[in-house]
Amino acid sequence: MIKGLIIANVVMYVVSRLVPTIALNLGLVPEQVITQLRVWQLFTYMFLHGGVFHILFNMLGLWMFGVELERMWGSRYFAKFYAVCGVGAGITQVVASFLPVSLFEQFYYAQTIGASGAIFGVLLAYGLYFPNRPILMYFLFPVPAKYFVAIMGGISLLSAIEGSGGVAHVAHLGGLLAGYLYLKGGRIHLLSEIKYRYLKWRINRMRRKFDVYSGGRADDVNRRVH
């Protein structure tokens, strides 16, 4: 699924460069979603990017944090999670444009593109499942995943409050929130994961009570005797 998403994003990036007008219909503009009912923009905006570095770092983040999640969840569940985070980020951007704050009112006519919102949701899930996995912050400093997520969320929150232009920080926060709510709502999946981790711990604990010796013929696949 991740390979498919990366290919789709790259293809759409090339197409949007060859036919720039395509972004006018597929990029997320709250005013168009509300008045013209272009609801598809809540999904299609995720596959558009503004430049080489924009798509490069987004796809790098998707690959870095998404591969292990897809292997653990399966492609189908990962695809649902990714879509929910991306659409949730888009909805957050639209809702924010109606807040009676001058900083957010400008969102109403502004266009938002990029997969960052969905990837922030993937990053949140990675931090929840692998909280102590070290991540190189800015490729320099090793930081546990749980703190890395908190730092990135804090940066987006402060940037959204300060109104840093050019980046949809509110959508990033929306992706984090959508991912958290989806995982919290998917209690059956989480309980299954907890059960799996518990059983794996019990198996590893039981193994310590036995010594493993090599025996039998060298070509016998069952030569390990407990």
Image (cartoon, rainbow, N blue to C red):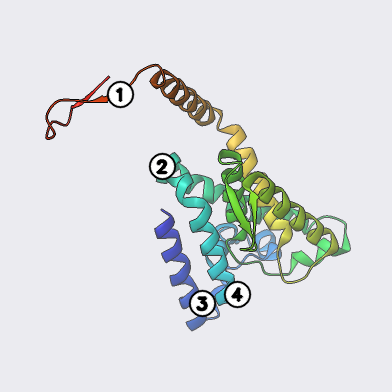
Measured Cα–Cα span from mark 1 to mark 3: 60 Å
x and y percentages locating residue 127 in the rendered image:
61, 44
Q: Is residue 225 visible?
A: yes
Q: Mark 3 points at which residue?
A: 16
Q: In this rendering, is residue 199 above or below 142?
A: above
Q: What residue type is labelled 3?
A: Ser
Q: What residue type is labelled 4?
A: Gly
What element does badge 4 sit on?
Answer: loop
Q: Residue at x 58, y 62 (%)?
A: 41
User: At numbered mark 3, what does the secondary structure look like: helix, strand or loop?
Assistant: helix
Q: Is residue 68 above or below residue 33?
A: above
Q: Mark 2 is on which residue type?
A: Gly
Q: How many labels does the image show?
A: 4
Indicate the amino acid at tag 1: Val
Residue identifier under label 2: 74
Q: Do the residues labelled 1 and 2 touch (CB within 8 Å)?
A: no
Q: Name the residue under label 1.
A: 212
Q: Which residue corresponds to mark 4?
A: 50
Which tag is nearer the camera, tag 3 or tag 4? 4
Q: Which comes sooner in the sequence, label 2 or label 4?
A: 4
Side of 194 where 140 appears, left or right: right
Label 3: few (<14), some (14–19) or many (≥20) C-alpha neighbours in 10 Å = some
Which of the image's four quarters has the C terminus?
top left
Instruction: Decide which of tag 3 and tag 2 comes sooner along the chain.
Output: 3
Q: Which tag is nearer the camera, tag 4 or tag 1?
A: 1
- Asked if disc 3 and disc 2 are in contact, CB closer than 8 Å, the reply is no
At 85% across and 63% down in the image, what residue appears?
Answer: 162
Comparing 201 with 61, the one in front is 201
